[in-house]
Image (spheres, rainbow, N blue to C red):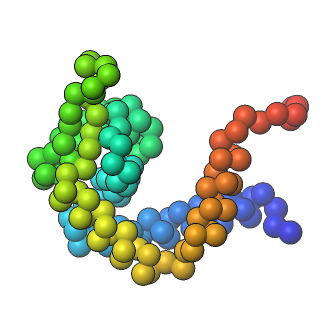
Amino acid sequence: MRRSADLMQLLTRAERLMARRLATVLAGEGQSLDAWRVISMLADGRGHFMTELADGAFLPPGSLTRLVGHLVDTNLLHRRVDDVDRRRIRAYLTPRGHRLHQRVSEAMRESLPVDEELESRLAAFVDHLAAPVTGITY
């Protein structure tokens, strides 16, 4: 059985290798990893508030604002006032943004040995890590 330090090393290496592979695909589309994180979140079609995007894309609010402005300028997403709270803005992918998401997703599926079971297990593992730690004393 692997020690936790080994697991940390494996997860870090997997993330960096996947990011490198994804960056190569995105470079052909003229996009960055940060842009992909935003585009990927918005692909669900529900629209997301800027605070949600900042958290999910691991970006500070100022950087996200600049990135979203660029994505709006390139017609990959648009902003709209929220129907419930008129003070808040939701971001949505444009049809062009959806097509980009589909192309990149297909390219990544073809180049990675990831199936639904692995994705499901990783999601469960992340949920487990996100849960509060209990029973540990120092």
Q: Residue at position x 36%, y 76% from top?
A: 107
Q: Is residue 44 left or right of residue 16?
A: left
Q: Is residue 71 left or right of residue 127?
A: left
**Quadrant of the rendered structure where residue 130 is?**
top right
**Quadrant of the rendered structure where residue 8 is?**
bottom right
Decide which of 4, 81 is in the foreground and name it: 81
The relative height of residue 71 versus residue 36 in the rendered view (above or below) is above
Viewport quadrant of the N terminus: bottom right
Q: How many marks?
A: 0
**Residue 128 in sight:** yes
Decide which of 7, 45 is in the foreground and name it: 45
Residue 75 percent coordinates (x, y)? 13, 51
Viewport quadrant of the C terminus: top right
Decide which of 47, 20 is in the foreground and name it: 47
Q: Residue at position x 35%, y 43% from top?
A: 46
The relative height of residue 89 versus residue 40 in the rendered view (above or below) is above
**Residue 34 in sight:** no
Residue 95 percent coordinates (x, y)? 19, 57
Q: Residue at position x 31%, y 67% from top?
A: 102
Residue 127 percent coordinates (x, y)? 65, 47
Residue 48 percent coordinates (x, y)? 35, 38
Q: Residue at position x 65%, y 66% from top?
A: 10
